[in-house]
Every structure is written in structure tokens, then in C-alpha cells.
Image (spheres, helix red, strand yellow):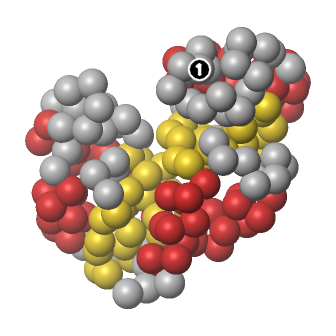
Amino acid sequence: MSAARIILIRAVNVGGAKLPMARLREIAAELGAVDVSTYIASGNLLCTPPGNPDAFDRALEQALTDEFGYVREAISRTPAEIAQALNDYPFGDAPHGHLYFLTGTPDPAAAEAFCANDFGGGEQLQIIGNNLHINYPDGAGTTKLTPARIAKALGVTGTGRNLRTSAKLVELAG
């Protein structure tokens, strides 16, 4: 399989926002995508969308809202963009490393101020382009670095994936 885009749906199958992966694949195909697949049940869609990828992402968001009643962002990257983000990861071979894919590029001053914050768990943060690179030295389970804090400080939202999942998505996109 070869996918032109990796689309990450924010915060599904947690907190009551159910999204069956089989239905996600069907919706993507109904919207005209080909080479459609998913990886694990956390909103990872691989496909080749028709036409403009941004327009496809917005149509997918609307279809999910219409069918499931919740609003979730679809954040897409090419496999090469995610591979580059992995290559750019500044914290070495961190066992609890994450990439947080943002919906836009934050203001540089806001990004610098945000990354200087201490969230209490020794987190290391760096923004490169439209990706927030995170190392959770004690694991992500108890961090006070929440999606709401990220969105408020940076003015853009996003969704995170650990480095292993990010690398697997690139591999699967082939």
C-alpha cells in the first residue's frame, strides 16, 4: 500500500468520543480517498485523498461531526513530513518521546515562552515548524502538559503520537 497522506484524528476512542476504525475507512472512501487503511484504534488514517488534501481534511471533520456529533480536528501530513519530524526530534532516543502535530505554526514568541515552561514532570519541549517535540522523561501518563494548555499557549491545537507510532505510520504509508 502507498498512502499520500497520514491523517491524525484528535482525541478519538478516549473520553467517550467513539470512532470505529472500520467506519473511518468507509467515510474516507465515501469522500473519494483511495489506498485507505487505519493503524490501531486511535484515529490514524492512511490514504490518498482526492484533490486538495486540506479540503479533504475539512470534509472528513464535517463528516465525523455529522455522524458522531463531536468536533475533532483532522491533522494531515505527508509520510515525508512525518519522517522529517522524526529525523528532527531533538531529544535523542527518548523512550517516552512524542510528536505533537499542530494545526498550524505557532507565533515564535509564544512558542519560545511555552517551551520555557515547567510542567512539573521534567518535560523537554521544542517546536520545529508545525510540530511540537516532547520528551516525557517520567512518561506521559501523569504530565500536566495537556492539550488544552498547549492550545491556549500556542493558539493552535494538535494531536500527539509517540515516536514508535509515528515511525510505524511512515513505514505503513510506504
Look at the image and tell me in which quarter the N terminus lies.
Answer: bottom left
Q: Is residue 34 left or right of residue 46?
A: left
**In this picture, is 117 found above or below 87?**
above
- At 66% across and 68% down in the image, what residue appears? 83
What amino acid is at disc 1? Thr
Which residue is at the front of the view, 96 or 157?
96
The answer to whether any part of residue 164 appears in the image is: yes
Residue 112 sits in quarter: top right
Residue extending furthest toward the bottom? 1
Which residue is at the front of the view, 123 or 170?
123
Task: Residue 23 in the image: state x and y as whole percent.
Answer: 14, 57
Count of number-bearing discs = 1
Q: Name the element at disc 1.
A: loop
Q: Is residue 71 left or right of residue 139?
A: left
Task: Residue 105 in the image: state x and y as whole percent.
Answer: 71, 41
Task: Residue 85 in the image: state x and y as whole percent.
Answer: 71, 58
Where is mark 1, residue-wise? 143
Residue 25 sits in quarter: bottom left
**In this picture, is 91 found above or below 31?**
above
